[in-house]
Structure formats: C-alpha cells, structure tokens
Image (cartoon, rainbow, N blue to C red):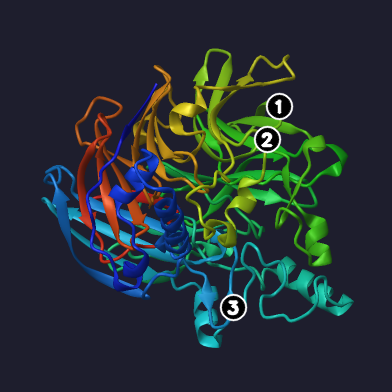
C-alpha cells in the first residue's frame, strides 16, 4: 500500500525561469486529462526547457552565501536545535571545460542551523586542492570520476605510450587523483567534522559553523592506500572504514580509528573471491551489526585495464563482470576474523541501509538495482538534463535483503525483495534510519523514491518494513535530496522525529523541507534564496555538541 502527500503552493520564480515557468496547476490539468492536445504539446516543450535548466544539475549561482531563512507553514519544532549539513557536487563547469557526470562536480557544502524556532543558512564551496587549482588555472587539473586522463590533455583517447605511462604514474602515485570531497560529511565524535569521497587524500576537515575548509585530515599511521569507501561507519567511539587493495592481496583492509585519534589500525582483511583473478568489487558503502562488519563484493569491479590503457570503460572506471561472482563477507568487529564468506545472487547496490543479527544469520538490507549497473550511466549530466516529463529512463530499484548464514556450512546466501517496489515507485536510494537502530533490528527506512515516469528520483518515501507499505511525499517538478532523519531528544519510538530534505524546483527556487517522521506530512519549509544543485549526504550536529 502506498500513500502520496503533495502540495500545490506556488513559489517565487527567478527571472531567468519566468519565460518557461509552469504552474503546478498546469501539470495537474495534464495529468488529469483536462488540457487540449496543443496545450499539452506546448507545455511539454516548455517543461523540457525548464528541466534542462533545473537547478538540481546546474552550477551553484555563487561561491558562497549566508543569511537568515524564512519559515513557511507551521512553526519549527521547539526541540529542533542544531545544525544540518549537506555535502554534494555544485560546480561542473570551469572555464571552457564542462564535466558530464554528477559525481564530477566540485563540492558544495550547505548548512541550515535551527535555533529556538528560527533558521539561518549558508552554502560554500569546499576548498580542496583540486577546486583551488581549477579556479586558478581556469580548467580542471585533477582526475574526477568520469575523467580517466588529465582533463586538460588534448590527446586522443588512449594517447601515446608516453601519455599513458605518465597517466598511470600520476594515478598510481596519487598526484593526478582528485581530493574533491563531494560525497559525505560526518562528525567524527570528537568535535571535528570531515568531508570526503573515494580518495584518501580527499579527507578534509571543515568548520561546521563558518563552512571554512580547515585543511587536510592528516592520518598518523603508515597505512598505504589511495582509495577508501565514501561511507565510513561512525559511532561515538570509533570510525570504521575499508581500504581496497588492488594488486598484492586483492580485497579490502578493514580499519578502525578511535574517536579523537588520527591513527587507523587494521582489524581484519577481506579477500576478494572474484573468479579469474578479478579485481576487488567497488564498495561505496557497507554495513555493521553489534558484533560484525558486513563487506559486500559485487561484480562492478575496478578496471585495472582501463587505468593501464588510460581509457574509460563503458562503466567509467569499472568493469561489470557478472561471471566473476557476487559474495558477502562477514568479519568479527573485535577479533577481525572472517566468520562467513558466502556466494550470493548477482547484485548492484550503492548504499546499504542497515544490518542486524538474527539467530544464526546476518540480515543486511540495501538499495538494489536488480543486478543492473546502468544507474551509473543514468547519472550522466546529459541524461539528467534531457527533457524528463514523458520519459521513464531511470533504472528500477528495490529494498533487497541478504540473509548470510553464520553456521559455517552453508556456501550460499539468500537475496530477496522486502516489499512490492511499486509502493515507492520502483525507486529507492539515499536511505536514512534512526541512528540508534544502526546494527539492530529496525522497522523504518526513509529514502528518495520515484514517481513514474521520471529520469531521476523525484519523491521521498517512508518505508515500513514490517507492514510492507510506504508513505510518499511528492511535488511536481521538484527534486528532493536525501531525507535525513533527526530523532526527537527523549523520544522512545523509532519514528519519533523529523525528516529534513533540501528540495530544488523546476521554477528555480529551493527550500529545506521538514516532514513529520510519523505521518510523513509536511511541517514547514525553510526557504532558501534559490534552488541548489543536488546534494548527496548529510549529517546532524546537535546544539549541545
């Protein structure tokens, strides 16, 4: 069962959208069949133009902004005192160079602070070395996600032998790798806040109030490695993360860093089981329980051949190798020993939702794309900017559940669909849960969903894993980002709190949406000065920290 909540309130429109701005009532008339064919045709053309210029995939209007924010709707909850931070790409065009993938954009950090019923906000570019170099030279100098060769190179694909050698040396040494920390932002449990992405050099400290980039996070260990997972698991006591080993001992090192420390320590190692000496699978995120760490190995694997040839593969920096197999590994958080390593059906997942222990097995849930990696291509900017009103080009996704046996004698794990994907529009991504339920049996997931037809996530969903139903929020022409759950202090129910999502609209405006996490109905909108580029992940810093 699925329910949809939506609003049709008008919003101020920036001047450059006025000529093609479309009212929600116009969209409603079309969807209900109340518009003439000629009107439908003209509206679709105008919608395509607006979609192409949608702020979700347009450059941020200015490098920085801060100010007071107006609150619309009901009053903000009196208990909501703290700062919401969101990280994500915000600048794709530098000089004459234009990037073509959403992952390429230079990081834009957004802050919304709530204090006793009022709100202030700010956004600012994260001043990584890659960003500063691009601004100084008028073009990118480091390799971003969709750029295997140096972006400034005018060589032909693959280049000369010398070009390829220089490129391999630059990538192997890390000199060409970007430190553009545009994916995650997370408090380390000791007052410090870090932004990061796939490269270890991208671990940057920022000031959560001013959004200043303080500088590099300097690890006080000798653990070698150029890459890391972009989603470390952070608790009040430690940070857990993975460091892939590409060549010598194919797999991942599992490391721990205590709160307040800069020293990582290896607690275990997961060996790659991919057939045919396949490289490690890409691990964008992983899951933990109270006792165990769950490391996925999917058939979307790093492409060493692509690096050596200085050529992008059909999957950018990866190869899709379903014949290499798919596996789930479980190691003990305390001893580092592998307690399970089982083969599972093929899967493709960027984000794991949660995991927990259930008698003699581990249950691990994720946002899964039916073993189809095409979501990587779907995030190319030229696809996102294409007219999307009558397209249904975005890949289907589901909440999928692994059951990983711990009995030591079962070689296969199970993979099943938890609930009918139609209740969340056959789309689910950017999941969030109550942080107190991390690693424990849980009931609710908040995520970005889809209301078809669409070519990107266009709604928010609250999924009930017990009743197997969903409540959805949707507004025509709007693109909401990750719905982040903030628990009410002193609350005892799993869904006692609010959900925060930054929304950009086709008309060019933007706001922070606050939903009641129980009813999933709108509480208020905190109006931003303009629509912001689509952001990936956020965090909450309570006022008393």
Which residue corresponds to mark 3? 97
The mark nearer the N terminus, 1 or 3, is: 3
Q: Residues within 10 Å of mark 1 (few under 14, many from 20)?
A: some
The residue mark sitting in front, 1 or 3, is: 3
Residue at x-position 62% and y-position 31%? 331
Residue 544 visible in the displayed image: no
Is residue 439 rendered to the left or right of residue 320?
left
Q: Are marks 2 and 3 in contact (CB under 8 Å)?
A: no
Q: Residue 44 at what x, y percent from top left? A: 45, 55
Tell me the distance, in whole angstroms, between the alpha carbons under discs 1 and 2: 9 Å
Which residue corresponds to mark 2? 371
The mark nearer the N terminus, 2 or 3, is: 3
Tell me the distance, in whole angstroms, between the alpha carbons under discs 2 and 3: 33 Å
Q: Residue 166 at what x, y percent from top left? A: 79, 76
Is residue 357 rendered to the left or right of residue 29?
right
> Which residue in the rendered view is the most extreme toward the bottom?
137
In the image, residue 91 above or below residue 455: below
Which residue corresponds to mark 1? 345
Q: Are marks 1 and 2 in contact (CB under 8 Å)?
A: yes
User: What element does badge 1 sit on?
Assistant: loop
In the image, residue 341 above or below residue 162: above
Residue at x-position 26% and y-position 61%? 528
User: What element does badge 3 sit on?
Assistant: strand
Q: Residue 264 at what x, y percent from top left? A: 55, 51
The image quadrant that residue 201 belongs to is bottom right
Is residue 338 rendered to the left or right of residue 238?
right
The image quadrant that residue 213 belongs to is bottom left
Residue at x-position 24% and y-position 58%? 11
């Amino acid at each position: 069962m699925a329910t949809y909540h939506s609003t049709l309130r008008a919003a101020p429109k920036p001047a450059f959208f006025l000529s093609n701005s479309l009212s929600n009532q116009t969209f409603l008339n079309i969807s209900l069949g109340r518009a003439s064919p000629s009107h439908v045709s003209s509206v679709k053309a105008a919608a395509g133009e607006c979609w192409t210029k949608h702020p979700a995939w347009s450059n941020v209007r200015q490098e920085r902004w801060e100010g007071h924010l107006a609150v619309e709707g009901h009053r903000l909850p009196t208990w909501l005192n703290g700062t919401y931070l969101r990280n994500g790409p915000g600048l794709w065009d530098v000089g004459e160079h234009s990037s073509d993938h959403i992952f390429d954009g230079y990081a834009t950090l957004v802050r919304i602070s709530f204090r006793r019923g009022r709100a202030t906000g700010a956004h600012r570019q994260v001043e990584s070395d890659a960003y500063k170099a691009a601004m100084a030279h008028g073009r990118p100098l480091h390799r971003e996600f969709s750029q295997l060769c140096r972006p400034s190179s005018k060589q032909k694909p693959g280049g000369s032998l010398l070009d390829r050698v220089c490129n391999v040396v630059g990538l192997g040494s890390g000199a060409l790798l970007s430190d553009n920390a545009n994916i995650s932002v997370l408090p380390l449990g000791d007052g410090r806040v870090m932004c990061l992405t796939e490269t270890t050099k991208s671990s940057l400290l920022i000031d959560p109030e001013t959004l200043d980039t303080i500088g590099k996070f300097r690890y006080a260990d000798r653990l070698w490695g150029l890459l890391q997972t972009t989603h470390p698991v952070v608790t009040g006591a430690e940070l857990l993360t993975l460091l892939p080993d590409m060549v010598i001992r194919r797999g991942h090192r599992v490391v721990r860093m205590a709160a307040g420390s800069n020293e990582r320590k290896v607690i275990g190692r997961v060996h790659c089981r991919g057939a045919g000496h396949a490289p490690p699978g890409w691990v964008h995120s992983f899951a933990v329980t109270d006792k165990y760490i769950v490391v996925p190995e999917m058939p979307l694997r790093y492409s060493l051949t692509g690096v050596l040839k200085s050529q992008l593969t059909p999957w950018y920096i990866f190869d899709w190798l379903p014949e290499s197999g798919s596996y789930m590994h479980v190691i003990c958080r305390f001893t580092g020993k592998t307690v399970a390593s089982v083969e599972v059906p093929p899967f493709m997942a960027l984000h794991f939702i949660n995991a927990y222990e259930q008698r003699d097995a581990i249950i691990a849930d994720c946002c899964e794309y039916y073993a189809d990696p095409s979501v990587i291509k779907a995030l190319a900017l030229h696809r996102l900017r294409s007219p999307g009103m009558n397209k249904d080009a975005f890949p289907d996704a589901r909440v999928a559940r692994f059951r990983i046996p711990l009995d030591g004698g079962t070689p296969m794990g199970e993979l099943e669909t938890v609930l009918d994907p139609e209740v969340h529009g056959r789309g689910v991504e950017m999941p969030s849960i109550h942080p107190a339920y991390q690693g424990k049996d849980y009931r609710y997931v908040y995520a970005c969903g889809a209301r078809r037809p669409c070519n990107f996530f266009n709604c928010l969903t609250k999924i009930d894993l017990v009743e197997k139903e969903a409540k959805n929020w949707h507004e025509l022409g709007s693109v909401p980002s990750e719905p982040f759950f903030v628990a009410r202090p002193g609350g005892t129910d799993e869904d006692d709190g609010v959900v925060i999502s930054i929304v950009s609209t086709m008309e060019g405006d933007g706001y922070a949406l606050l939903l009641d996490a129980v009813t999933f109905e709108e509480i208020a909108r905190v109006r931003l000065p303009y629509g912001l580029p689509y952001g990936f992940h956020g965090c909450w810093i309570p006022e008393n920290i």
